[in-house]
Amino acid sequence: MKARPSINSIVTRVGRWYVSAMNALCKRASILLAIVGLTWVQSAPVFSAETNNSATPKSFLPLDLKNLLTQADEFTLLSLNPTPDFEHKAKKTFHNHAILGQTKIKNGAPRDKLVTALADGIGAKELNIPGVINIPADCFNPRHGIHAKQNDEAVDFLICFECGQIQANSNRGTNWSFLTTRKPAAAFNRALRKAGVRLPKN
């Protein structure tokens, strides 16, 4: 008659089985995480999650956003009616604002000047004084817009130099808000006038 295994031997066998099973599970989990991580890296959008949907205006133009504007396959500068077209009377609108005209800005010096002017307006020293909180104005009457697209990513800027505010969003659900000085408006208006685009009267 065979001797029955002792409690200690049973516990030892169960322990070995548990350790072996957990090791196999950990290996599978590591492989799965590696695959998921690789997939995320390969499909990661231009815009990082850190820049997503911030209610507080940023004091600088994020580098990934600046690069998209500079390198975009399409860059359209728009002249807008500052009064929202809530009644949908206009044939062409840009975020509820009637488009008065628009022009394509080619890659190179002309576009670089606009992007630099925009970045300088956002990062101006007078808007970034330590200890001073800049409160956005209650108005928002955008007269300028930008639509830029690179591959399958697009971004829109709605710009009000009058009250110094910018609202921007991407087709991937990223939203930004910025404060700016009025200084970039001169460069934007020059580009529009050069292309024969009319500016708003009011």
Image (cartoon, rainbow, N blue to C red):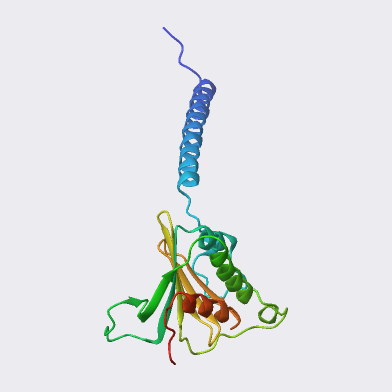
Q: Nearer the viewer, residue 75 or 13?
A: 75
**How many numbered marks have been drawn onto this rendered protein structure?**
0
Q: Where is residue 100? Give x, y as percent.
A: 37, 81
Residue drawn at 54 percent across, 87 percent down: 163
Q: Please determine whether, in this image, residue 201 is positioned above or below residue 44.
A: below
| Image coords of residue 90 (percent x, y) | 29, 82
Left or right of residue 18: residue 126: right
Q: Quadrant of the N terminus?
A: top left
Q: Residue furthest right?
A: 130
* Residue 60 figure quarter: bottom right
Quarter of the image with the C terminus is: bottom left
Please give the name of the residue rendered at 51% of the width and 20% of the height, measured from the top-left corner: 6
Horizontal relation, residue 23 to residue 96: left or right? right
Q: Position of residue 46 (x, y in %)?
A: 50, 55
Depth check: 104 or 68 in front? 104
Q: 15 or 77: which is nearer to us?
A: 77
Measured as percent of width and height from the top left, residue 183 is found at: 61, 81
